[in-house]
Amino acid sequence: MTTIVGGTYFEQCMCPMWQELFGSGGRAATAIARLGGEAKLATYVDETSEAILRQRAALEGFTVEATTIEQSLHFRYTHGLANPSIRPAPKPALTLKVMDACVIRFGMLEGDSVVTANCAVYDPQNPTNPVPFHANGSKAQRLALVLNRSEAEALHGSADLNAATLARALAKSQSAEIVIIKMGPAGALLYFQDQIHHIPSYITSRVWKVGSGDVFVATFAWFWADLALDPVDAAEKASRATAYYCQTQGFVSEDELAVYRPVPAPLPKKSRTGRTPLVYLAGPFFSLAQLWLIEEARGQLLEMGLNVFSPVHDVGHGPAEDVVQKDLDAIHACDLMLAIGDGLDAGTIYEIGYARALKKPVVMYVENESEEDQKMMQGSDCILCDDFVTSIYRTVWKAAEL
């Protein structure tokens, strides 16, 4: 039995369209139940959410201990990598108290949870002010921390350490047996018994990110805490289960996981020039919508550790004699290109052709372009993606190959 204490939230994504009741707690309970595990969810819900949640629990085979609140929270995303807007503002609720042999504790917005467990897996879910596991009196004989890089740095209080040193420091300061630092397309770093292990991410043809970290935490906890697998093996299975979720927006069964063998993503490295790979970000920037999309893509690529040349940011508007040669020089200097195909802008199409003539890899985001309009790019071996988040991940994965 694994007890999960975590939020149950309505989730809505604009692109791709998605509207479900999950949250970290609901998603983790579903993931474990689908693997064949026995799960119990302790959570906050309003009356409407509770009715939906209990129907899901009956269908999937987990149990629910609900604490009633006035209104469940709604998370709204523009895309799967966006920071969500959250409504209504959370109101403090009664602290949940959970005692079991195996417990997953997620950070929550509505309230707190005090955990007593033999084995606990803790995901603080707060990139700016993560709360230490033991700060509220929670206890665990064996503790695994699973957190992303920004949470790890905030919890330690320093952004100057490499991931391995940071994991060791957290294991000591937080009295954790295991520390897993998630690093997006680069996979995860796992610290255990003074050894550092790399857990790969896996390449998928589509990347659905909302809740992917919840699936990783739940699957790892079930294999490590409930089935007593070695933590490295548990984390590798969790990463494959997460890849299945990212690919399908669904949950893997134990039989499906046994045969699911996606290709591991390459580790990021310096380009042949000895620096972080440089991405040329091509795309139109003549309307607010176009500028927003360029800004969003640039921010996501920078967040994932790549260098970016963006004509509108690094050259700006101007006559041909002022901007064209600078842009072409940047294509020569870049390692690969991400092209936004919005409207098949003539300048963007020219840049794609120029890059391919130089044998530069090109990833192209083509959400609305017809098969006929994609023909030349497809025939010249561009990587075509009709999903924004997938185009970002494919760019990062391709950069790691160079």
Image (cartoon, rainbow, N blue to C red):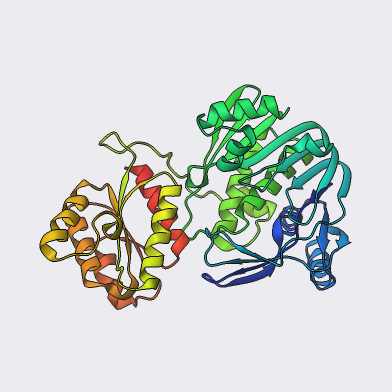
Left or right position of 155 against 25: left
Of all residues, the one furthest to the left in this rendering is: 321
Look at the image and tell me in which quarter the C terminus lies.
Answer: top left
Between residue 373 and residue 45, name the one nearer to us.
Answer: 45
Q: Where is residue 127 drawn, in percent x and y?
A: 61, 46
Left or right position of 80 against 258: left
Q: Where is residue 357 drawn, in percent x and y?
A: 16, 56
Q: Residue at x 65, y 33 (%)?
A: 179
Q: Where is residue 144 drawn, in percent x and y?
A: 71, 35
Vertical position of residue 101 compared to residue 47: above or below: above
Residue 388 appearing in the image: yes
Q: Residue at x 47, y 51 (%)?
A: 203
Q: Residue at x 76, y 35 (%)?
A: 228
Between residue 101 and residue 157, name the one nearer to us.
Answer: 157
Q: Residue at x 54, y 48 (%)?
A: 261
Of all residues, the one furthest to the top in this rendering is: 194
Left or right position of 235 against 5: left
Vertical position of residue 48 compared to residue 270: above or below: below
Vertical position of residue 322 compared to residue 166: above or below: below
Q: Quadrant of residue 319?
A: bottom left
Between residue 7 and residue 16, name the one nearer to us.
Answer: 7
Q: Quadrant of residue 102?
A: top right
Q: Quadrant of residue 120?
A: top right
